[in-house]
């Protein structure tokens, strides 16, 4: 299981892989699933995760859903995808040339 303090490093490792369903991706999902459920049930946990979970729930289920916990698996998958995509490496670009424009 991935510890909470290792989440940023783990998502970077995942983003460097092209395989969606790797063991590390499944491990990340297993780690995030309880965090998502607690955020849905009690609104507790890491503030950024709680905020993201609440916003995503409202987007996919609308305001005041009957059973918010029923959306936990879907929200967990979306969170994993969002974390992987947020740490994608930027394309290599040559450095900008220093130029002076004169009139």
Image: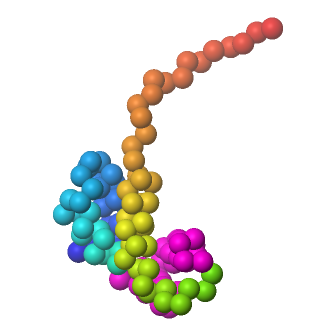
**Towards the viewer: 86 or 75:** 75
**Towards the viewer: 69 or 102:** 69
Residue 71, image x, y percentages: 44, 80
Vertical order, 77 against 64 (above or below): above
Vertical order, 39 against 31 (above or below): below
User: In the rendered image, which quarter is residue 33 located in?
Assistant: bottom left
Image quadrant where one finds the C terminus: top right
Residue 14, image x, y percentages: 29, 55
Left or right placement of residue 29 versus residue 45 in this view: left
Q: Is 35 included in the stretch rendered in magenta?
A: yes
User: In the rendered image, which quarter is residue 25 located in?
Assistant: bottom left
Extreme-top residue of the structure? 103
User: In the rendered image, which quarter is residue 74 located in?
Assistant: bottom left
Image quadrant where one finds the N terminus: bottom left
Q: Is residue 44 visible?
A: no
Q: Is 24 included in the stretch rendered in magenta?
A: no
> What range of the chain is rendered magenta?
34-62
């Amino acid at each position: 299981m991935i510890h909470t303090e290792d989440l940023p490093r783990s998502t970077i490792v995942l983003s460097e892989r092209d395989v969606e369903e790797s063991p590390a991706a499944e491990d990340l999902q297993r780690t995030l699933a309880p965090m998502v459920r607690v955020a849905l049930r009690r609104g507790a946990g890491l503030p950024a995760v709680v905020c993201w979970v609440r916003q995503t729930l409202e987007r996919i289920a609308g305001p005041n859903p009957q059973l918010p916990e029923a959306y936990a698996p879907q929200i967990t998958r979306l969170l994993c995808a969002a974390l992987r995509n947020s740490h994608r490496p930027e394309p290599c670009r040559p450095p900008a040339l220093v130029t002076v424009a004169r009139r």
